[in-house]
């Protein structure tokens, strides 16, 4: 079906557009999230081109790369944004752990021509906990201001649901693709919906900072 692809790329284009328009007003953390969104757009676009323009039979190797790249960008975004020493240390340790684990999985468990469901699940689990740490930290702040104008609040809300949601539904995607195609399709639709949700919250997050600065003059957290 094409409507989901059209909607996905429409949201990607909208997200990338607001990212570049307000780029100079964004914090380093939000910029790193924006780079992850941009990477998702470019690799998904490349994947479509490989299949429909260059007649490749398999484009899944691109998503092995995307999983690695997005985890690095997401995790370092929170490393710069959070203040708790132990959480920042956890993030730093998680980066080489994830990179090594992902490479091993891609070489020996789910090769580059297969869907990397284990790496994706591990990435989602780690990102889910990191975003959970974010919410714990901001709610413990004694001087928290209007959180609805904080871009990372909206982005983290989306990432929290997307990460834990995808962790639950995608863990066995590769198995389902091979053995239960109908169930794999249902899981795919849940995954697509979660992608839409994240891109929408990313757009809302950036626009919330614009509304904050232009109308109210509040400082972001």
Image (tube, rainbow, N blue to C red):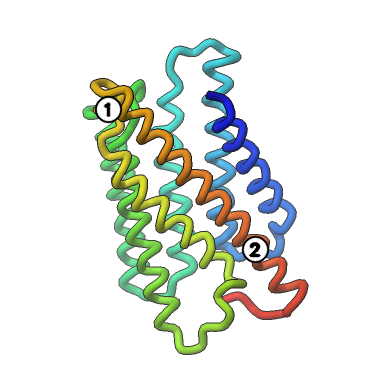
Distance of label 1 from label 2 (alpha carbons): 40 Å
The picture places residue 193, in percent across and down from the top left corner, at 47, 43
Of residues 102 and 164, the one nearer the viewer is 164
- What residue is rendered at 56% in x and 49% in y? 199
Residue occupying the point 36% across, 65% down: 132
Element assignment for label 2:
loop
Q: Which mark is residue 106?
A: none
Residue under the point 53% across and 10% down: 55
Residue 127, x across and y down, in percent: 37, 55
Residue indicated by mark 1: 176
Q: Identify residue for label 2.
A: 26
Nearer the observer: mark 1 or 2; the answer is 1
Q: Is residue 44 above or below residue 125?
A: above
Relative to 1, is 70 above or below? below
* x 24%, y 21%: residue: 179
Direction bottom: furthest residue: 142
Q: Residue furthest top?
A: 55
Q: Is residue 154 left or right of residue 101?
A: right
In the picture, measured across the screen, residue 65 lies left or right of residue 25, that is left
Q: Position of residue 97 (x, y in %)?
A: 28, 49
Look at the numbered disc 1 and give the secondary structure of its residue.
helix
Residue pushed farthest right?
214
Q: Position of residue 189 (x, y in %)?
A: 43, 35
Marks 1/2 in contact by CB < 8 Å: the verdict is no
């Amino acid at each position: 079906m094409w409507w989901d692809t059209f909607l996905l790329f429409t949201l990607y284009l909208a997200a990338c557009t607001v990212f570049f328009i307000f780029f100079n007003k964004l914090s380093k953390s939000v910029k790193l999230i924006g780079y992850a969104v941009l990477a998702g757009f470019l690799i998904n676009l490349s994947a479509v081109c490989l299949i429909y323009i260059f007649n490749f039979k398999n484009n899944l190797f691109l998503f092995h790369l995307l999983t690695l790249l997005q985890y690095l960008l997401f995790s370092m975004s929170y490393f710069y944004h959070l203040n708790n020493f132990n959480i920042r240390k956890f993030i730093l340790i998680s980066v080489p752990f994830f990179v090594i684990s992902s490479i091993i999985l891609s070489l020996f468990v789910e090769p580059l021509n297969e869907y990397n469901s284990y790496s994706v699940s591990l990435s989602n689990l780690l990102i889910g906990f990191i975003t959970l740490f974010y919410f714990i930290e901001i709610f413990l702040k004694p001087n928290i201001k209007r959180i609805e104008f904080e871009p990372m609040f909206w982005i983290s809300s989306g990432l929290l649901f997307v990460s834990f949601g995808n962790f639950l539904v995608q863990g066995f995607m590769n198995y389902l693709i091979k053995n239960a195609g109908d169930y794999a399709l249902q899981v795919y639709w849940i995954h697509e919906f979660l992608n839409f949700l994240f891109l929408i919250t990313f757009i809302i997050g950036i626009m919330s900072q614009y509304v904050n600065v232009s109308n109210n003059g509040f400082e972001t957290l």
